[in-house]
Image (cartoon, helix red, strand yellow):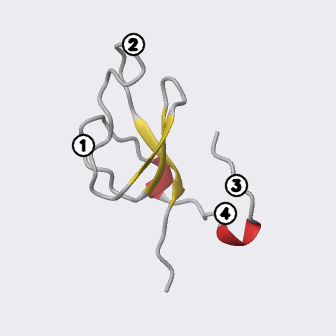
Amino acid sequence: MSLYLFDEFVKKAKPHAAFMDEHPPGTPAPYAGIYRCKDCNFEIGIAKGHILPSDHHHGRVSAVRWILVVEARHVA
């Protein structure tokens, strides 16, 4: 589970497809942020465009799907 300390740095998002879409392993992350494996709940931080980890990241063979749980946004 993702944790945070300072409320002013995190804002609750409105319903958005970015948080509903599931992403297969080996594909580029469409957003920078924290992704969670729906199979084992392992979380990773990843930059936009970097490749999401493989099917075997947790030692089991299963249909891994990544979901975005925290989007990292640059605010000027």
SS state under label 1: loop
If you read the primary sequence from the N terminus, does the residue marked by circle 4 or circle 2 appear first?
4
Q: Residues within 10 Å of mark 1 (few under 14, many from 20)?
A: few
Percent x, y for residue 62?
37, 16
Mark 4–mark 2 Cα distance, whole angstroms, equals 33 Å
If you read the primary sequence from the N terminus, does the residue marked by circle 2 or circle 1 appear first?
1
Percent x, y for residue 69?
54, 49
Mark 1–mark 3 Cα distance, whole angstroms, equals 27 Å
Q: Amino acid at mark 3?
A: Tyr
Q: Amino acid at mark 4?
A: Lys
Percent x, y for residue 11?
66, 67
Residue 38 drawn above or below residue 35: above
If you read the primary sequence from the N terminus, does the residue marked by circle 4 or circle 3 appear first?
3
User: For mark 4, what is the residue?
Assistant: 12
- For marks 1 and 3, give the one nearer the viewer: 3
SS state under label 4: loop
Q: Residue at x 29, y 29 (%)?
A: 54
Please say if the residues under marks 4 and 1 sit with CB atoms less than 8 Å apart: no
Q: Residue at x 42, y 21 (%)?
A: 58
Q: Residue at x 51, y 31 (%)?
A: 42
If you read the primary sequence from the N terminus, does the residue marked by circle 4 or circle 1 appear first?
4
User: For mark 2, what is the residue?
Assistant: 60
User: For mark 1, what is the residue?
Assistant: 27
Mark 4–mark 1 Cα distance, whole angstroms, equals 26 Å
Q: Residues within 10 Å of mark 3 (few under 14, many from 20)?
A: few
